[in-house]
Image (cartoon, rainbow, N blue to C red):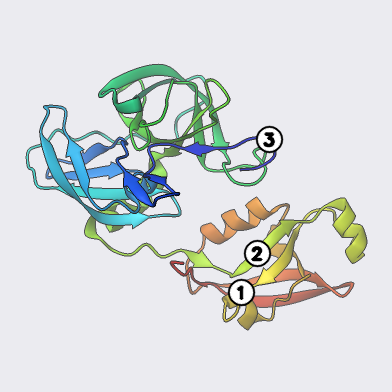
Amino acid sequence: PFGDLFYEFFGMQQRDMTREVEVPAIGSGFIVRSDGYVLTNNHVIEGAKEIVVTLADGRKLSGKTLGRDPRNDLAIVKIDAKGLPAVQLGDSDKIRPGDFAIAIGNPYGLQHTVTAGIISGLARSLDGDPKEPGIYIQTDAAINRGNSGGPLIDIDGKVVGINTAIIPQAQGLGFAIPINVVKDVLGDLMSGKKIVYPWIGVQLQDLTPQLAEYFGIREKRGAVVAHVYPESPAEKAGLQEGDIILRFADVEIESISKLQNEVRNRKAGDKVVLQIWRNKSYMLLTVTLGEMPEE
């Protein structure tokens, strides 16, 4: 959540917190390989004690979580079946605002619901400031609870995204994970390999004009270190609370989102030089990116 907006991830496991009683949840998914590999959102299956996959022909099969990518909200569920019809994956880098888009899923349990619209926007963010660039596709194809994990399809019938989130108080504002993000990790997900994320180990806040004045720095944009996690790559590199990260390698850091994207594009083990501001002077620190802890 941020500002007055709340992005709702739908199709989630529901729980009565007063009695700790789990209740059934419904989401969507699609077959990416004919021998029973089903792609969906991680939040659809996270915490599930039992997964049942209902196919288009009405068969209900037990599913097992094979691989998870919590950061990108992806998961592969394996079912014991062969010869299934599998989707064709498109190229989400080639889509443009105004392109035709179709969403397929099970909103509120209404199976095989198809809605049409257009690609409304690209590179949307669901974290922090919505005006900051992100990875998500925005569409006005009608999607609701239960659509989560279903495909967003282009005019050629190829999957270009995975329907993932909505703004519940708005109309025509749905968001999908680009399929090219999926392609980067699909092999690892299907093999059950652990997905490793690069990590610095800090909590951050954007450098506002007020903070810039307080810290005595002329730059008005950057990322302020609010907390350094113990034994993290940041701590080992010597980062401290109150440091202001201005550059990551050769990239100017204009916001937290920019820094997060730059880290995301690296690998654990990469060494990166940071330009920071500390005690009214510039410094250079070298940080070796680590593996993000699971918790």
Q: Quadrant of residue 134?
A: top right
Indicate whether 66 appears above or below 104: below
The three-letter amino acid code for the residue at tag 3 is: Asp
State the residue at coordinates (61%, 82%). Answer: 236
- Closer mark to the observer between disc 3 and disc 2: 3
Could you classify mark 3 by the number of other residues whose Cα lies within 10 Å: few (under 14), some (14-19), or many (20 or more)?
few
Q: Residues within 10 Å of mark 2 (few under 14, many from 20)?
A: some
Residue that carries the numbered disc 2 in the rendered image: 203
User: Does residue 105 appear anywhere in the picture?
Assistant: no
Q: Say whether disc 3 or disc 1 marks the residue closer to the N-terminus.
A: 3
Residue at the image position 28 percent from the left and 56 percent from the top:
67
Which residue occupies the foreground of this view, 174 or 267? 174
Q: Which mark is residue 4?
A: 3
Residue that badge 1 annotates: 229
Return the x and y of residue 75 as percentages of the image width and height: 32, 50
Is disc 2 placed on a helix, strand or loop?
Answer: strand
- Quarter occupied by the N terminus: top right
